[in-house]
Amino acid sequence: MKKFIRWYRNMNMKKRFILSLNLTVVICVLIISVVALINRIDREKNEAEDKLFYELEYLVTILDITRDRELDEVKDVFYNKSFYNTGYVSMIDQDGNVVICKHNEGANVSGEQFFGDIEIMREGSSRYYDETIGQHKWQYFTWYSPEQSYIVATIDQYEFITKPVMNVILILVFAIVFSVIVFGIIIYFITNTISNPLKKLANIVGQLGKGVLPKKFDYNYEDEVGQLTRSVNNLIDGLKKTALFAKEIENNNFDYEYTPFSEDDMLGNALLDMRQSLKKAAEEEDLRKAESEKRNWATQGIARFGDILRQNYSDINELSYNVIKNLVEYLGANQGGLFIINDNKEKERYLELTACYAYDRRKYLEKHIKIGEGLVGNCFIEKQTIHLTEIPENYIHITSGLGQESPAALIIVPLKLNEDIYGVIELASFNKFEDHKIEFVEKVGESIASTISSMKINQRTAKLLEKSQKQAEEMRAQEEEMRQNMEELHATQESMAEKERENRKIIDELKAELEKKEINELTEKLNKQNKDVEGVEKNATEPGEKPEKGEKYGPEEKPGEKPEEKPEENKEDPSKDAAKDIHDESKTESQSEWSEHLKESFKQFKKGRKK
């Protein structure tokens, strides 16, 4: 079936149309034939049944007439009775014995299937299969009560039904073939009037399928083909307009006027949506390009100013001039100034104009602005960018050889780094400052602030280095002075040591003289005491003389007490004490002078180190 459907769809329209009509005719004829055949079969069967039942009634009538006779006299009537070519009549009793039959008389058919139907129905018809001849047969039967038997008419189905039906089928087949031929010829001429225009339309549609826009097809009839032709021609016109519209879109002409065929025109509406999408995409692309150009512009500018700021500048004014000059030129501004905070004195901080540039010329201006004074001072305090498009009168004028004029836009940007402000940039222009340029100035301002911070740190470092070098030189001078003092002190110590040696020598000589003198004095004293003792003893030995009160025992002695003896080690020599006191005084005096000198030198040394 699938192969037939594929084969049918691969046929051209003409053949398909002819085949369809022929099949329609054949099917219609077949339906009519089948209906006619069924009616024929029913009619033949009904006529045969009527005839057979009539014959059976006829035999019953004969049997009734000849009831008083023997059955053998009636057998010839049964034997001679025939239906069609092979039909016959028989009598079968209720036990299944065949009483009269020219083919199987005397046989018992009680075991056959048809006999069971006969017993049940007693009158009617049944169909069974005769295995002996391999054919279907029909039996029509009726009950004959006088003989308690069945009168049965047996007919071959082929002669009864099949043969008449076959005759009808042959007639129908002939009619179908004849109808197909006649209808085929008629349909051929009819389809030519349809298929030829359709072939041309198919050729046109084929060209449209290939993307070619063909010429219109002329067909001036008002039939279905004419309607189809007009639709194809309208399609060609619409596709031409659509192609022209697409060409205009290709040329970025998004404002070209185009109207779809209808509200349901998918292609036209899709093209309009595509135009809108492409227009939006083009706008987004332009915006993206503009943003990309702005980013590239800002990136190149940051790189340019990075190179400028990386140069080694010893003078902050020269750095300021290069920065403001390039910034004015890169932004396309007309005038600019760079203010840097001067914090040399903590109590007198102010913004100092370090560079000014306008119209490709360097301006030599001196200007100091207090913190919080004017727009620049407020910008420094607020740490926010100020952008003005309405400039206050007499605030600033851009002067050239042709005169002076107020600018159209003014931006004041703080040089901010980590919330610390190092200065302010002021730029004026006759044109508006775009947002990306303001952001660029703010980013560059951070880099400038970082560079200024580094320069100030370097300057402070240089000052501190210079100061430390000066202090180091002073320290070296103090060290040299101290070294000289130490040498002098050493010389003094040596002279003092020499003096001490001389003093020791003198002291030793004095000690020797004192010892010698002391010994002499002691000797004299002892001699004197010895003399006194001898005198006393002498007086004591004389009789009749008693010592006076207080003289016998000495001036401090009491009667009964011995004189107190003092150890010799506690007796001090006055000459030794005097020499020792002179030595100690000279030594103490020299040591105190030396220690005072040393303390003074160390105080000066520590003071220089701290500085």
Image (tube, rainbow, N blue to C red):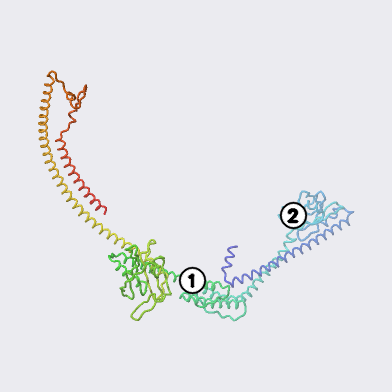
At horizontal 25% and vertical 52% (from top left) the residue drawn is 607
Name above or below for residue 471 compared with residue 202. Answer: above
Other residues around mark 1 within 10 Å, as few (<14) / some (14–19) / many (≥20): few
Q: Seen in the image, is 517 located left or right of residue 28?
A: left
Determine which residue is flagged by label 1: 280
Q: Nearer the viewer, residue 137 or 576?
A: 576
Query: Disc number at residue 254?
Result: none
Q: Position of residue 602 (x, y in %)?
A: 23, 49
The answer to whether residue 154 of the structure is visible from this angle is yes
Instruction: Classify the position of the N terminus by image quarter.
Output: bottom right
* SS of the residue under disc 1: helix
Q: Quadrant of residue 592?
A: top left
Outermost residue to the front: 544
**Is 31 displayed left or right of 257 in the figure?**
right
Side (left or right) of 291 relative to 548: right
User: Which numbered disc flags the more N-terminal residue, 2 or 1?
Assistant: 2
In the image, farthest residue toward the right = 68
Q: CA distance from mark 2 to mark 1?
A: 88 Å
Q: Quadrant of the C terminus?
A: bottom left
In front of the other: 341 or 125: 341
Q: Position of residue 465 (x, y in %)?
A: 26, 58
Label 2 secondary element: strand
Query: Which residue is label 2 attached to?
Result: 128
Q: Quadrant of residue 58?
A: bottom right
Residue 565 or 582: which is nearer the viewer?
565
Residue pictured at 72% horizontal, 56% vertical? 135
